[in-house]
Amino acid sequence: CIRDSVVAPFIITYKLLNYAHERKHFIGKVINTASISHTDCYHHLNKLDYNNLQFENGLKWTSFKAYGLSKLLVIMATRGFYYDKEWRIKLSPNTCLINMDPGTVNTKMLLAGWGACGIPINKATDTFHLATDDVFYKPNSEPKYYVGLRERNPTPLCRDETVCLELFKYLENLCGLM
């Protein structure tokens, strides 16, 4: 779960922003999908336990806890780009970093686990609106988190600059991107 849901978007964002920086291009918005479920990984809400990111040391694994943790880490990693001094220089002053919760959408994963309890996929348009509507364009500012197209505060851990930077450096090292 961490590999696909955290490491992959981190590498893609990292390489995309680095590519743009090296070529003196700018990227207006980078949108990473998170979830309100980031509040449901209880063990990690006060401090990241790097020895238990895969629930390998005594924590009871559930798909819901793993999903919540992955979305917590996505929010924190996105903020790491903004908080890291080197990346802050690399980011164009025109770049806007966004995390968003698309809502409960009837994806294959949701249907398999809980049944049709969300909105149809063709009604899930938050990403499109965040990408195209100028009201969500807030460059050179702390990454925003949106739920239902409304700005919300993620958990306190996600707003802790030191912890987000620690995760950012951990992911850089894990992915060999330093």
Image (cartoon, rainbow, N blue to C red):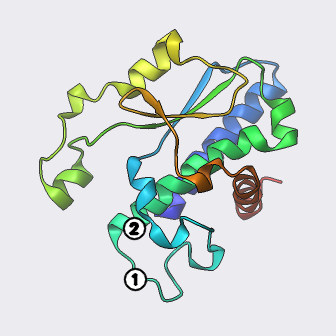
Residue 48 image position (x, y, % from top left): 62, 68
Residue for point 22% across, 27% down = 122
Quarter of the image with the N terminus is: bottom left
Residue for point 56% across, 72% down = 53
Name above or below for residue 164 compared with residue 44: above
> In this orientation, which residue lies closer to the viewer: 115 or 9?
115
> In this orientation, which residue lies closer to the viewer: 44 or 67?
44
Query: In terms of image quadrants, where is residue 38?
Result: bottom left
- Marks 1 and 2 sit apart, C-alpha to C-alpha, by 9 Å
Name above or below for residue 78 compared with residue 96: below
Residue for point 41% across, 19% down = 129
Q: In this view, does 161 lie to the left or right of 99?
A: right
**Does residue 5 appear anywhere in the picture?**
no
Residue at disc 2, secondary structure: helix
Look at mark 1 in the image and give the residue it sits on: 60
> In this orientation, which residue lies closer to the viewer: 58 or 27?
58
Quarter of the image with the C terminus is: bottom right
Q: Which amino acid does label 1 sit on?
A: Lys
**Does residue 9 appear anywhere in the picture?**
yes
Residue at disc 1, secondary structure: loop
Look at mark 2 in the image and give the residue it sits on: 65
Q: Which amino acid does label 2 sit on?
A: Lys
Name above or below for residue 1 compared with residue 106: below
Q: In this view, does 55 lie to the left or right of 138?
A: left
Residue 40 image position (x, y, % from top left): 40, 62
How many residues crowd around disc 1 within 10 Å: few (fewer than 14), some, or many (20 or more)?
A: few
The tag earlier along the polypeptide, 1 or 2, is 1
| Cβ–Cβ under 8 Å for marks 1 and 2 | yes
How many residues crowd around disc 2 within 10 Å: few (fewer than 14), some, or many (20 or more)?
A: many
Query: In terms of image quadrants, where is residue 23?
Result: top right
Residue 81 image position (x, y, % from top left): 73, 41
